[in-house]
Amino acid sequence: MNLNFMSKFQYSPSGSGGFLTENFLLHNKTAQKLYHEYAKDMPIIDYHCHLPQKLIAENHQFENLTQPWLYGDHYKWRAMRTNGVDEKYCTGNASDYDKFKMWAATVPYTMRNPLYHWTHLELQRYFDVHDVLNEQSADAIYEECSARLQTENYTVRNLLRKMNVVTVCTTDDPADDLAYHQQLKQEGFEIPILPAFRPDTAMNVDNAVNFNNYVARIEKASNTTVTSFNDYLDALKNRHDFFAANGCNVSDHGLEEIYADDYTEQELNEIFNKIRSGKELELSERKKFKSAMLIIFAEWDCEKGWIQQYHLGALRNNNSRMLKLLGPDTGWDSIGDFSQAKSLARFLNKLDTDNKLAKTILYNLNPADNELMATMIGNFNDGSSAGKIQFGSGWWFLDQKNGMISQMNALSNMGLISRFVGMLTDSRSFLSFPRHEYFRRIVCNLFGEEIENGELPNDIAWIGKIIQDICFNNANNYFGWKIKKGSPSVIA
């Protein structure tokens, strides 16, 4: 289906010129062939994101371009703040139009930041707008894109269809009721919207009040009373089972580092009783408790044949003043320099020794850990399945061109990029799916350059298959979803 809009925005020598043409990031004929004939039309499996499933269940209609673009997008907020924009235009009470105008004024200053590419890819792919965004073009772009968003073809479900998304995996707390996931399944929405079990809060004992408030949430969600550590595990296991019954086969953690301290059952009971009494724990006690919970969650994942993901290395909430004012996930995080290798090896080894190591994807936020991760996965790939332990795609601050290339080069040099499960959005925005295209163009260019340099054979059929595997097939097989290509239909 096509909308009856005539775009006001076209390429022009004085405007966008050769910017973001069909061969963007494809620097030779072979790369172009690999992308256009093999990668471009592959469906998208987004196996880790933060899309609000409520909006999908309600088939939400955005009123204007600001709402899907700037609400909740801390990438853009950070850029705007750096450009001297007042907070009221980021998270404050300025009008949607004024917020968009301030973003448009910021965009020209984001050159060489991935936001510049993402912004214009999104304008092109969703709205057929091919001009650059700046203060001069802002009004016309806002008017046209907002008008489109108010039409039937631009509901959130059709935004997913438009990008040929065939599976979405959200991020969900164990206490969540998954009501919107259930609604979507009951309605028969053809794009599976699957939950992922993210129990980080359940193991966070850094603050006694917060932890005890969370235990109360788990008691309510599981309809149980928690008076002991074993009760707490039973309640969480109840939620793990509930997630599985609702189509979940993925877990996820966002941690500074893996915890792998030794502990005893008696110590865990004492630690749990102490924090339940309202007393704060010592550092050693917190680490023992977190270590135990990570092992327990991983064992449950293995029992059910789930895939577990570990996002490691973010130093979160660095600005305490703004955290108090705005809360978490508002753009005050950075790369951390945690020591990852020893504890990660101990953790994976314990699970492997007990034959309880599930399929695992490891993500690092510090690029200094690329080679560490690329070699760590080889320690536990045991031949039981192709690519059982994965080095995940460049994440957060690294999901840009240099970060993706560095991650893939490390994986190529020390593992098998041919078994890589590829890209994910990790996004809260329904307009973020061109990031998959961005990734695919970079992959095709990497292979295309080495073919033309004589470093790889000119076997387009085989390398084209590898490209398609990285883009879609590997993830489809790895997660066991067996999504058929060509479903759902793409909305033009």
Image (cartoon, rainbow, N blue to C red):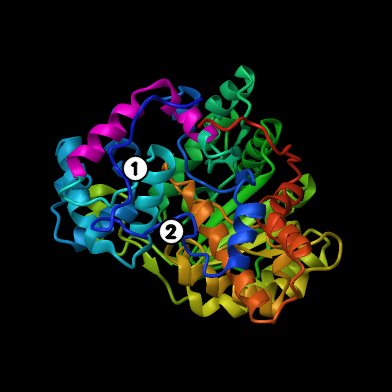
The residue identified by callout 1 is 129
150 left or right of 30 in image: left
The residue nearer to you, when weighing 314 against 421, is 421
At label 1, counting other C-alpha atoms closer than 10 Å, the crowd grade (few under 14, some 14-19, many 20 or more) is many
Which amino acid, mark 2? Asp
210 left or right of 364 in image: left
Was residue 412 drawn as part of the magenta stretch in this picture?
Answer: no
Q: SS at mark 2? A: loop
Q: Find residue 127 and report its horizontal and vertical position in percent.
A: 38, 38
The residue nearer to you, when weighing 251 against 60, is 60
Say if 443 sits above or below 449 in the image. Answer: above
Which amino acid, mark 1? Val
The residue nearer to you, when weighing 7 against 468, is 7
The residue nearer to you, when weighing 323 against 272, is 323
Q: Could you tell me how far apart the alpha carbons at marks 1 and 2 are, in whole angstroms?
A: 48 Å
14 left or right of 468 in image: left
The residue identified by callout 2 is 206
Q: Find residue 144 and report its horizontal and vertical position in percent.
A: 28, 33
7 left or right of 450 in image: left
The residue depicted at 78 percent of the width and 63 percent of the height is 462
Was residue 144 drawn as part of the magenta stretch in this picture?
Answer: yes
Specify which label sits upstream in the sequence, 1 or 2. Answer: 1
Segment colored magenta? 138-161
The residue depicted at 33 percent of the width and 68 percent of the height is 112
- Quadrant of the rendered structure where residue 258 is? bottom right
Q: SS at mark 1? A: loop
Between label 1 and label 2, give the one nearer the viewer. Answer: 1
The residue depicted at 20 percent of the width and 63 percent of the height is 82
